[in-house]
Image (cartoon, helix red, strand yellow):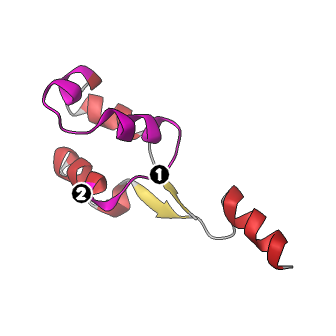
Amino acid sequence: MIRYKCDIIQKLKDAGYNTTRIRKEKLISEATLTNIRKGKLIGWNQIDIICKLLNCDVGDIVEYAEGEMPTIEKRLNNLVH
């Protein structure tokens, strides 16, 4: 499962991008911010923007956690077996 390695919202704040600035400059959509807060994955375009804002690599903000399975995959597995 892919998951966030850090608190992206906090990292953005630390880099000078508070949510007011993000909204005002239309850097990231409100839906994307909500998904990040809820720990839901976002699209590659949004990850690209965040990496540019934070001057970081994708691997600095997301990671693969082996053995963990999202709820939807668990349900699908149960249907198959």
The residue shown at (17%, 34%) is: 26
Is residue 77 rendered to the left or right of residue 73?
right
Task: Indicate left or right for 12 with 6 as reference.
Answer: left
Q: Which residues are magenta?
A: 20-45
| Residue 57, label in figure | none
Picture residue at 75% right of the left edge, 64% below the top: 74
Under mark 2, the amino acid is Asp
Decide whether residue 26 is among the magenta residues. yes
Which element carries disc 1, helix, strand or loop? loop
- Name the mark on residue 5: 1
Mark 1, residues whose alpha carbon is within 10 Å: few (<14), some, or many (≥20)? few
Other-residue count near label 2 (Cα within 10 Å), few / some / many at <14 / 14–19 / ≥20: some
- The residue beneath circle 2 is 48
Instruction: Name the image quarter holding residue 59.
Output: bottom left
The residue furthest top is: 20
Q: Mark 2 vs mark 1: which is more N-terminal?
A: 1
Q: Which quarter of the picture shows residue 77?
A: bottom right
Residue furthest bottom in the image: 81
The residue most toward the right is 81
